[in-house]
Image: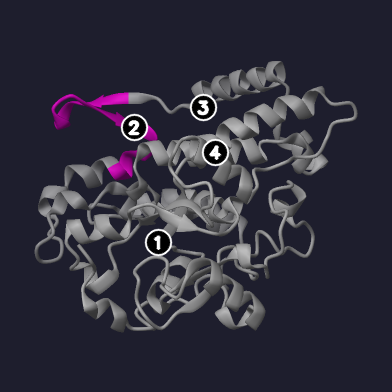
Amino acid sequence: MSPPASLSHSARFENSQPRTDISSTFSDTVKLEVTRLSGAERWNCSTTDPEFAHVVAQEDSQLISLKVQYWIQAGLFPFSLKAAINCIQLCPTCHATYGCFNDPRWVFLPMDLDFFIRYELEHQQRRAQADPPSSRIVPTVKDYRDHLTSKGLVANDAIGELYRGYYLKNFLCGGRLSLDQLRDLTTPKPWHGHPLAAIRQGIAILGSARCYALGRTKIDELTTLRDLYFNDKNLIDAKLFALYHLPPAENKRKRSDEESDHHEKKPKLTTNADNGGTVQDVGNSQDARHLGSQADVSGPVGVQADMYTSTEWVLGPSATGNDAINRFAPVLQSTDVTWLLR
């Protein structure tokens, strides 16, 4: 089932957050080449009004850093960001939701991520055995296409490889598309570009609260790739590695010391006979009194009193003058707080 015609009139500014790049940064030659390879349709929703979007944005701060070009340093981007293999045609709405780096709502990924996991594992073994160690080699466009061809998923003369789109938010047409329409839009389809460009955004969305829309299997595959690509001592600053990566024996001893300190400092507990024998923290008696009086406290309309936890009060409604003195006397005696109370 095809998406409704109203998709072709998606509002350019439906997404209020700024994109990380603009299509005008591609040369006319690159745009013509992308059109030759992919046709005139938009890759995701087949609408009009195309934009030539960077798959890896030029303003990606994790990539174009003044100090370390991290992905390039890791040997993961053997291509120019201005090349056709880093370009995809999207409608303005899909471009905005993909290019919004802080909160992407749509991504596209190679259909077979397991191929890239196995490829990296094999090459890590080869790099470890080489003397001197060799640099990383990642699958090329042809490598991924040959893999899919061997499985009978694409033809020998195919221009692109199979990728699938993933919606992290149901945003097209205000979320009114049917399930069948969404299935149609997310059916795997060919794209001519470099697979690591698409994988870059997939790994980035692991830091988004929306990533769980992908499903557990896809999240696990992306997490595995992230660990394989970046859990590398050579990519970590030597001082930071020495600071945080303790030897196993020392790390175990440090945890043991911390646990011992925690048990020694743990406040004593006492039973409050007036509260049905419940255990109360002596060091938090003010909170205990507040909890006992919550039934008498009325909150905003429609909000139950038990939603107000003890941590929301500094001095609750049952606090006394002595509570205030005991709590703040040490601060008033040791600090000039005049400027704090202005």
Amino acid type of disc 4? His
Residue 114 is situated, as x and y percent measured from the top left of the image, at 50, 35
Mark 3 vs 2: CB contact within 8 A? no
User: What residue did someone put label 4 on?
Assistant: 147
Amino acid type of disc 3? Lys
Res. 216 image quadrant: top left
Distance Cα–Cα, label 2 vs label 4: 62 Å
Disc 3 versus disc 1: nearer the observer: 1
Is 87 situated left or right of 138 in this image? left
Amino acid type of disc 2? Asp
User: What residue did someone put label 1 on?
Assistant: 106
Mark 2 vs 4: CB contact within 8 A? no
Question: From the viewer's perspective, is residue 306 above or below residue 98?
Answer: above
In depth, the one of 165 and 37 nearer the eye is: 37
In depth, the one of 214 and 196 nearer the eye is: 196
Secondary structure under tag 3 reads helix
Q: Residue furthest front?
A: 157
Distance Cα–Cα, label 2 vs label 1: 48 Å
Q: Return the disc, 2 or 4, that comes first in the chain's sequence.
A: 4
User: What residue did someone put label 3 on?
Assistant: 265
Residue sitting at x 64%, y 70%: 59
User: What residue did someone put label 2 on?
Assistant: 281
Disc 2 versus disc 1: nearer the observer: 1
Residue 259 is situated, as x and y percent measured from the top left of the image, at 54, 22
Q: Give the range drawn in magenta.
A: 270-287
